[in-house]
Amino acid sequence: MKKAVLFPFEKVLLPVVRHFQELQTEYELTEIIALPGMGLSSKDAGIACNQPLIGVQVVDKLDTESSNWDTLILVREYLPVGFGEQDMVNTLLSCKKELVVLEHSRDRLPQWLLQLSKEEASLRLVLPKEFWEQEVQATGYEGIHTPVLLIGGVVEEADVLEVTILATKILKDMGLEVATVTKESAAGIFNFLDFKPLYSECRNEAEKIIRLNHVLQIIEKEMIPDIIVIEAPDALIRYNDLAPNGFGIWTYMLSQAVQIDFMVCCLPYDLAQTDFLKLLDQDFRLRYGTGIGMAHASNALVDSVDLINSKRLSIFYDIFDRMEVAVKEIWTETEIPVCNVISHADRFGIYLHSLLESGE
């Protein structure tokens, strides 16, 4: 395997780093590079979210002459404005490094980078399946026969990507052919799909829903998956009046484009209580056409002080062991299965297997 680094590292990318070696075999991740100011230099990446150590160190300097790696995996969407991307790319190539560029779609790439990718064999563009780059040929709105598992969060930061990636791994280990859709371009390294460009198209909502349906028809017919796993494109519900946190509009559009068969709901562990889960379950059955099959209790918590003072939804990551203690108490109290998938992947696998069996 080629030795690689990922740049720039953001907290949202921790699940990609954690499962990097499990879902692809081309690259070995030797370290990850964060932009200066994150306070993670020389620390394990797991510290970023107060989660268990994963054995990958964070550095805050991009050393293009380092002998510790051969390939830079660039997640373009997290580059700050005015970073000087072209100079960095030219320096990398002059140092005989390989470059893998992850992006949502081709039209988000600058022309100079597109041209350079044609000239340089050591520069590789990783884009999602580009079904939406051309007009999709479909006979009309049709039902999707492949089972669909939706993974979404009451707040988006509650490990939704983590659960999506781990669910994909578990399902593949079961021997299933899985088509996975996320909203993170970095997940393209696992050959995941990406619907984000579809939601930003200049079309009205009805046209977007039909186009989503057409793309899912193509995925079903071309990839022939046993199951489709989809990360919800936005938070599932309005959080409260102070900080709406989105209204689940994109996810509702998705539920109109395809029947959702199963759902995993991710939420802060302090909200993973029987009464609240029942309310969510009833709401989701009406809103999305399916209830909560299981819940992931995250150590991501809403900062209530900041919520009141600034009227914005901000997240902090609680001590992981504190969350563990709370979740162990929840296990025996809730009718809907609850666990933290990071520390109890085996339990999540059992729940997931039971969920799929109950839907057969």
Image (cartoon, rainbow, N blue to C red):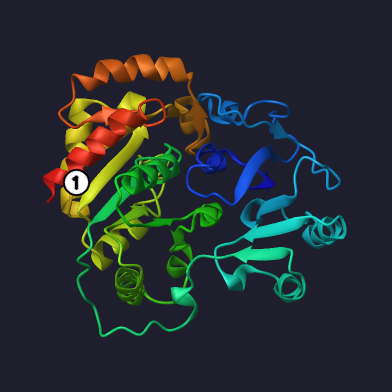
Residue 248 screen position, x and y as percent: 34, 53
At horizontal 53% and vertical 43% (from top left) the residue drawn is: 16
At horizontal 34% and vertical 24% (from top left) the residue drawn is: 270
What is the secondary structure assignment of the residue under circle 1?
Answer: helix
Q: Amino acid at mark 1?
A: Leu
Q: Is residue 337 visible?
A: yes
Q: Nearer the viewer, residue 3 or 282?
A: 3
How packed mark 1 is, by other alpha carbons closer than 10 Å (few <14, some 14-19, many 20 or more), is: some
Residue 118 figure quarter: bottom right
At horizontal 59% and vertical 61% (from top left) the residue drawn is: 103
Position above or below: 200 against 70 = below
Q: Nearer the viewer, residue 260 or 342?
A: 342
Residue 67 screen position, x and y as percent: 82, 42
Position above or below: 205 against 335 = below
| Lateral position of residue 182 relative to residue 277, left or right | right
Position above or below: 138 against 267 = below
Q: Mark 1 — residue?
A: 356
| Lateral position of residue 91 relative to residue 228, left or right | right
At horizontal 56% and vertical 52% (from top left) the residue drawn is: 186
